Image: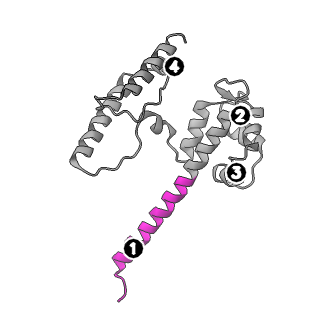
Amino acid sequence: MLPLPCNRERHEKKALQEQAAMEHAQVVEAFEIFFKVLDESQLDQDASITRKELEQAFTKSEFTDQHAMLLFGGNYTIAEVFDYLDLNHDNEINFNELQAFAERKGVGIQNMFQGYDRREIGSVVDFLRAVQDTMLINVKRVFMTELDINRTIGIDTHYIGTTDWEMEEEDKTFLVEVESSLFFL
């Protein structure tokens, strides 16, 4: 029996979506590795990347030619990559320029930081938690200003949910220690 035309179209559409998802996952992985090697190549530990630091990042073994090809195409030089990333032409690549590059490639890195990642909904409770988290995130966004962003320090607590009322003792201790150390900044 031959498949119906609508079944075949749906199957082809699903195959294209799966292929696009796989390609996007590869680009996201390349970005993660690129950001990791950029961080490791920070010679002066400031908030920007120099040409020398970018060159050093490209020599790291974790960042392969395949990763570079996914992000920058087949024929590139490090100088061309630097000029492409340095949008304001100040001879430094800052976080905003990296973020803009990621978004041009379809990777929303700001979403990861703000908690907009995709989550599976398996029940009504999961749905209600997702709605609550969405509301809390958007309330925070409404009241955040440019001054708040400059004085905010991120603390990796993604494993603690907004409705996690019973934290483990180690988590409480960690947050107190981080808060205490931030006092001296």
6 on left or right of 145: left
- Badge 1 density bin: few <14, some 14–19, many ≥20, Cα 10 Å: few
Q: Which of 58 and 162 is in front in this view?
A: 162
N-terminal-most mark, 2 or 4: 2
Please say if the residues under marks 2 and 4 sit with CB atoms less than 8 Å apart: no
Distance from disc 4 to disc 1, alpha carbons, whole Å, reads 50 Å
Distance from disc 2 to disc 4, alpha carbons, whole Å, reads 24 Å
Which amino acid type corresponds to the residue marked 1 in the rendered image? Glu
Report helix, strand or loop for mark 3: loop
The residue where tag 3 is placed is 64
x 37%, y 33%: residue = 160
Q: Residue 150 carries which label?
A: 4
Report helix, strand or loop for mark 4: helix
Which amino acid type corresponds to the residue marked 3 in the rendered image? Thr
x 38%, y 23%: residue = 172
N-terminal-most mark, 3 or 4: 3
Q: Which of marks 2 and 4 is in front?
A: 2
* Magenta segment boundaries in residue numbering: 1-26
